[in-house]
Amino acid sequence: MTHRKNTTALTLTTAVTTSILAAAVLTGCEPPAPPPPAPVVKVAPPPPPAPTVTPIKELMVQHDIDSRVNLPEDKAPATDEQRIAVLKFFDAFARGNSEALKPMLSAPDQLRLDGMVDGGIFKKTTEEITRIDVRCGRQDSNDCTLAVFHVAEDFEPQLWVYTSGDKPEFDAVATPPGIMEKLSGENWIAAWYEVLKLELAKADEPDVVIEPVQSDYSTKDDEGGGDAAPTPSGPSSPGGMPGKRKPSDAPIKAPRPPGFGTK
């Protein structure tokens, strides 16, 4: 009996479905189309992680840098290689270690260091260092580091351009007179270069601007007769001709040469 009921129900369901489809065909309606596939969203790959640098405090511990070397994080170079080179360079000054310092200097500065060591100046000066304030940056496509040495009661500023790598090299930039009083603003390295530029331009100027002597050689005859005008004379120039003093033979003063501790 149950089997007969199920068969009857199935027959009815089939008949209803067939009737609906037939009605759809007769009325011109089509079954709804399937939904379109979801669009493919292309996700850009994440950017590579920014290069990380080791904090200055950690590098000072790792490389046993003298605590008198003060390099703030916001004024430090952008790579560990540069940071280590700068820290070791000024550590050699703080410890008065000329043997560690010399290989990191350019050839002209090595000769200057030899003279300072032989004369006892390097030892005497570095023994009085109480602090070295360091800042780094770039100027004219060069990596630069500027240090202000606290030596007893005085300040000794010096700027270097440098290269890092397996063999770092530091080359001193010329130090204009009174540079410490002329550094201002956030970028002392750019200020140093600007002062140096002005000093070099001043050094190119001649000591004396020579002006030609203006003399009137016309005669009264040229104007219609008469005696010739008297020739100018005076005790201030040879041959009785007045004029400017002879230019000085002394050389033009150049800016103070590079080198730590020079005056």
Image: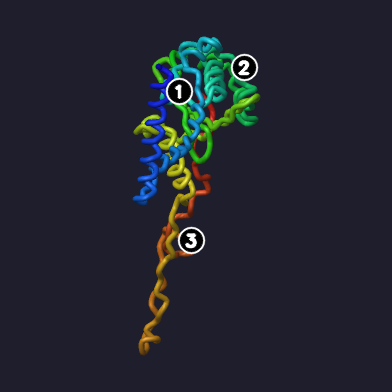
SS state under label 2: helix
- The residue depicted at 60 percent of the width and 17 percent of the height is 98
Q: Residue at x 46, y 43 (%)?
A: 197
The image's mark for residue 134 is 1
Q: Position of residue 137 (x, y in %)?
A: 47, 31
Please tell me whether mark 2 or mark 3 is closer to you in this view.
Answer: 2
Q: Disc 1 versus disc 3: distance between alpha carbons?
A: 58 Å
Residue 107 image position (x, y, % from top left):
65, 30
Q: Amino acid at mark 3?
A: Pro
Residue 54 position in % (x across, y down): 50, 18
Instruction: Determine the image quadrant of residue 226.
Output: bottom left
The earlier-in-sequence mark between 1 and 3 is 1
Q: Earlier in the sequence, mark 2 or mark 1?
A: 2
Distance between the alpha carbons at the discs numbered 2 and 1: 19 Å
Q: Quick check: 132 above or below 140?
A: above
Q: Nearer the viewer, residue 124 or 247?
A: 124
Give the numbered dot on residue 238. 3
Query: What residue is shown with label 2?
Result: 100
Seen at 45% across and 20% down, the residue is: 71
Q: Is residue 86 above or below residue 140?
A: above
Report whether residue 177 is seen: yes
Along the viewing direction, whichever of 42 and 207 lies nearer the viewer: 42
In the depicted structure, whether residue 33 falls above or below residue 210: above
Q: Residue furthest front?
A: 1
Mark 2 crowd level (few <14, some 14–19, many ≥20, 10 Å Cα): some
As helix, strand or loop, the secondary structure at mark 1 comes to: strand
Three-letter residue code for mark 2:
Ala
* Residue 153 placement: quadrant: top left
